[in-house]
Amino acid sequence: MTTRTILLASPRSFCAGVERAIEVVEQLLDRRSHPVYVRKQIVHNTHVVAELESRGAVFVDELDAVPDGATVVFSAHGVSPAVRSEADRRGLDVIDATCPLVTKVHAEARRYAARGDTVILIGHAGHEEVEGTMGEALDRTVLVETVEDVARLEVEDPSRVSYLTQTTLAVDETTAILDALRNKFRGLKGPAEADICYATTNRQEALAAIAEESDLVLVVGSTNSSNSRRLVELAHKHGTPAYLIDDASGVEVDWLAGVRVIGLTAGASAPPRLVAGVIDWLREFGPVEVVEREITQETIHFTLPSTVRNS
Ligand code: SF4
């Protein structure tokens, strides 16, 4: 039987912000005797949410499902000031697991809006991170998703425009949108570097390095995970069929027909053990050789919020 090669993209799977957010909930579950509520999915992964739920975490969509005075964790994607105010008004014990890199984007939004700029946020409508960031300066922020959106955009004062980006975008598409913005608004200001985070960038570059050699790409991640979906799109751009799977059970045997080299990666919210599960599942269909292709080592680690460290 022919040996299949699995090209394992590295870095892949959990980023520092996701590890931190999960640890926040785990530590609270260990230390608190009363219920721990979490607003929205702590990170966009069905397995992570199910595991924390099985340990006692209560996931809710909005704060009105949280009893007055209860402990509530804000997810890694961040919240708008309106949500914070509501939590204050209700006397909730808030533990904020927002990724520090998202918090940085919120601070930029406040700073740009405070100096009177129109803030152009490059991102995806409806994503929780986008809702949170826009909420920092709702009346001064506009969302653009495509180059076409930029062409249609009208702002109050074209000489006072700043941009921000969602942290989990496709690097190449964002570059094209930014170029269009710079052409349209000559005085465009923004962060020193676009806010697409290190983890998103590294996972895209790691996949780009193996996509063309692969006959098939499997991306482990949930459908609501923005950075995982961008990885599937990236593989398609390299001309390789690619699928997003929550775990090994999502792989269809038909996909493997005639496939000798499988590229395997995982979005930043997908647990590493699910990748190992896919490799084990593939072994059931014949011998496999696993080759890891590491483009860089990630050493970033975020400390836990002081409210958790000191509780
Ligand atoms: S993907 Fe980036 S911004 Fe999002 S949680 Fe991970 S490190 Fe933070």
Image: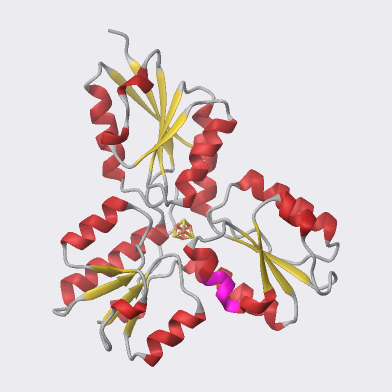
Q: Is residue 62 magenta?
A: no
Q: Is residue 108 left or right of residue 303?
A: right
Residue in the picture at 36% in, 66% down: 40
List x then y, in percent, for residue 251.
Answer: 32, 30
Residue in the picture at 41% in, 61% down: 17
Residue in the picture at 26% in, 35% down: 249
List x then y, in percent, for residue 97.
Answer: 38, 71
- In terms of image quadrants, where is residue 106? bottom right
Is residue 295 at least partly visible in the picture? no
- In terms of image quadrants, where is residue 42? bottom left
List x then y, in percent, for residue 207.
Answer: 50, 36
Numbered disc total: 0
Is residue 37 at least partly visible in the picture? yes
Give the answer, above or below, for where 7 lies relative to 302. above
Task: Give the farthest residue toward the top.
Answer: 1
Our reading of the magenta stretch's main secondary structure is helix
Q: Quadrant of the C terminus?
A: bottom left
Q: Quadrant of the N terminus?
A: top left
List x then y, in percent, for residue 71.
Answer: 27, 81
Task: Identify which residue, 253 or 105, lies in the foreground.
Answer: 253
Q: Is residue 7 left or right of residue 46?
A: right
Task: Identify which residue, 253 or 196, lies in the foreground.
Answer: 253
Give the answer, above or below, for where 209 lies relative to 3. below
Give the answer, above or below, for where 224 lies relative to 302. above
Task: Give the farthest residue toward the left.
Answer: 33
Q: Give the extent of the magenta segment.
A: 132-136
Residue in the picture at 32% in, 9% down: 2
Q: Is residue 246 left or right of residue 193?
A: left
